[in-house]
Image (cartoon, rainbow, N blue to C red):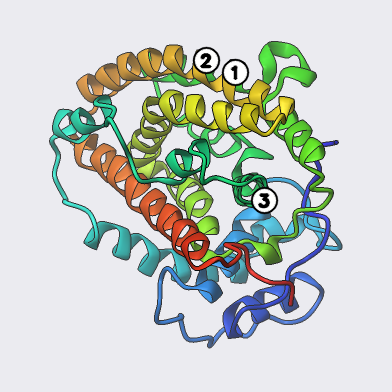
Amino acid sequence: MTVAALQALPTARGPVSEAVLEALTGGRLTTSLPVPADPFGEDLQLALHLLYELHYRALPGVDDDLEWDPDLLRLRARLEAPFLAALRAATSGSDDVEAALAPLLLEPVRGTGPSWHLSSEAGTLEQLREYATHRSVYHLREADPQAFVVGRLEGQAKAAVVTVQHDEYGAGRVERMHATLFADLLAELGVDDVPLDRAPATTIALTNAMSLFALHRSLRGAAFGQFVLVEVTSSPGSRRLSAAFARHGVQAGVRFYDEHVEADAVHEQLLRAGLRDLLEREPHLAADVVLGIEAGLLLEERFGAALLDAWERGDSSLRQHS
């Protein structure tokens, strides 16, 4: 399976995402749009995702020059403001980086997130398929948001991110790129198309936060903090997911997650060394580093709770086709 850009534009989920889709397909942007009341809601998160996507790979039928359209950028800023404010309000505001990291270094005997469920006897192959479909929103572009951060860093922090990115992008071998490995996983699961319409806001918000932090130099500390969170927590969860895929005989899933068990244990140490250097150079970024860690945890918890709640009801965790 090839790692492709979005194959089709999604269906609007409210007036703002509808206006963005109209502007992206040749219409005029309504500049007086009210910002959605829920910063974590479907309309705002889809609209933000589409606006961020202009900075990555192509949107089907959308002019590449719209990446720097001033009206779209102004709208993006209006949508980012309540999202960032909500993340700040839902996190501690602390600047104690070590205290934020300490709980992440202790693996519980028994946890409650999706990887724990999927690795248990209760986890089904269909739930694994759903989980992979959710994660495709990020993993088919794995490491791309963090690539924006490289030019905003110096010293060991820059060296650490570049070294981690080298592994994420396959160390020069396209077949070893993590995005390629994930595409292989989807192919073995029989997921031929992963339309954005299937992804709820709780899924999209995870990648939106990465883009929000990475695309603003002023938020480089938060971007680095969220990247540290991903790498510190990846190995244990990946080990459980590898076991889940092995139990169902999905070898591409085993390969993808085994790669993360090994690589991310090293990446954790690299990024923690980079973090020390970053804070020595720019100690004022400590609160933003904590924001990145805690916001990432918050969004992961919301994502995991949405999946587990749906599965407990016997429902699909994916949005139904419009």
Q: Amino acid at mark 1?
A: Glu
* Residue in the image at 60% along x and 55% along y: 52
Q: Secondary structure at mark 2?
A: helix
Which one is nearer the viewer's eye here, 202 or 209?
202
Q: Identify the residue at image location x=26%, y=25%.
A: 105
Task: List the residue tagged with mark 3.
Answer: 126
Amino acid type, mark 2: Ala
Left or right: residue 212 compared with residue 186 = left
Percent x, y of residue 209 = 45, 51
| Pointer 1 local density, CA inside 10 Å: few below 14, some 14–19, many at least 20 | many
- Residue type, numbered disc 3: Glu
Residues marked 1 and 2 touching at CB (< 8 Å) = yes
Viewer-side residue, 152 vs 291: 291
Asked if the residue at tag 3 contacts the one at tag 1, i.e. Cβ–Cβ closer than 8 Å, the answer is: no
Crowding around mark 3 (Cα neighbors within 10 Å: few <14, some 14 to 19, many 20+) is: few
Residue 227 in sight: yes
Q: Above or below — where is 186 with respect to 198? A: above
The numbered mark at residue 263 is 2
Quarter holding the C terminus is bottom right
* Left or right placement of residue 125 versus residue 279 in this view: right
Q: Earlier in the sequence, mark 1 or mark 3?
A: 3
